[in-house]
Amino acid sequence: MPLDPASGVYYEVHGSGEPLLLGFPLMASHAEIFGDEAAAVKDGFLAGLTDAWRVLLMDYPNIGRSRETRPEDLTADQVCRDLLAVADAAGFSRFAYWGYSWGANAGLQLATRTDRLSALVIGGWPPLGAQYADLLAAAEEQMADPPASSHMVLRSPAQYAQWVHYGRSMAGWDEAQALARICCPRLVYAGGEGDVYAGRYLLRNASTLRAWRQELEAAGWHVLLFEGRDHAVGLDPAAVVPPVRAFLDAELRHGH
């Protein structure tokens, strides 16, 4: 598969059927980035989807076989432009989006900026009550000495600054007002024990989702908690693909 000339992002398309953009942390070059043992993660997602879904994967942001970009260019607006550019390159005019953790954050930004989404699935990041300020503060504090876990997905320690620029670009974002503009079918999920530390800041992703569950469901969200699982559930295709697939099939394929 080629690089998208507009964004410089490497992408792959697998399967046939309804279009689905499967975003971060799933990558087109998943095994090359995360190691051979991670190939089973990508394969598990594709095995559970590609019989009825045309799945778009990409190396993003600024990772794998994609063209290198400047950290300061990773703003929320630019991320949305890049995602839509790759969708264009893959021939996806209207598509479902599924992302986890940072990919969920990016999906929320995308869904409030375009009407091209047929469905939105996000995990590991709450649509309401999210700790944007804490996430930015953690990135700023860790920029000089990025955590070891980030080295696997960065070309260099200097690239870690992209998370700071991304966080700053969302300063003042009114999530409640923005979410009111999302009209497509939408599902959010998390591990029931999915609160996770970013530096010294505890991101209460699961606790927040649980606290806002009633309001979210009243606003049209499907809410799913994987009790007894932590944040790592997002990379467990055996756990997450069946319920998400059931949601997508019901909403967009009418169960067929």
Image: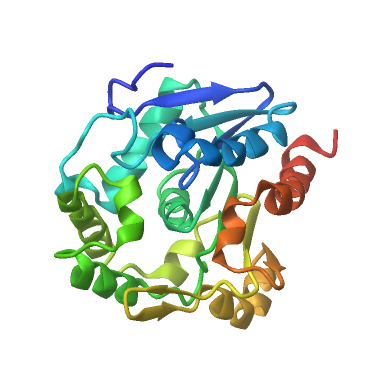
Image location (x, y in percent) of residue 173 = 33, 67
Q: In this view, does 25 lie to the left or right of 142?
A: right
**Residue lying at 43% horizontally and 63% vertically, measured from the top left:** 178
Image location (x, y in percent) of residue 2 = 38, 16
Image location (x, y in percent) of residue 167 = 27, 63
For this orientation, the residue located farthest to the right is 256
Relative to 170, is 27 above or below? Answer: above
Along the line of sight, which residue is nearer the eye, 150 or 115? 150
Relative to 85, is 159 above or below? Answer: below
User: Which image quadrant: the C terminus?
Assistant: top right
Q: Examine the image and state in which quarter residue 177 appears.
A: bottom left
* Image coloring type: rainbow
Q: How many marks?
A: 0
**Residue lying at 65% horizontally and 73% vertically, measured from the top left:** 192
For this orientation, the residue located farthest to the top is 1
Q: In this view, does 183 lie to the left or right of 18?
A: left
**Residue lying at 33% horizontally and 71% vertically, measured from the top left:** 135
Image location (x, y in percent) of residue 185 = 65, 51
Along the line of sight, which residue is nearer the eye, 71 or 251? 71
Along the line of sight, which residue is nearer the eye, 165 or 185? 165
Along the line of sight, which residue is nearer the eye, 210 or 62? 62
User: Which image quadrant: the N terminus?
Assistant: top left
Relative to 47, is 117 above or below? Answer: below
Q: Is residue 224 left or right of residue 35?
A: right
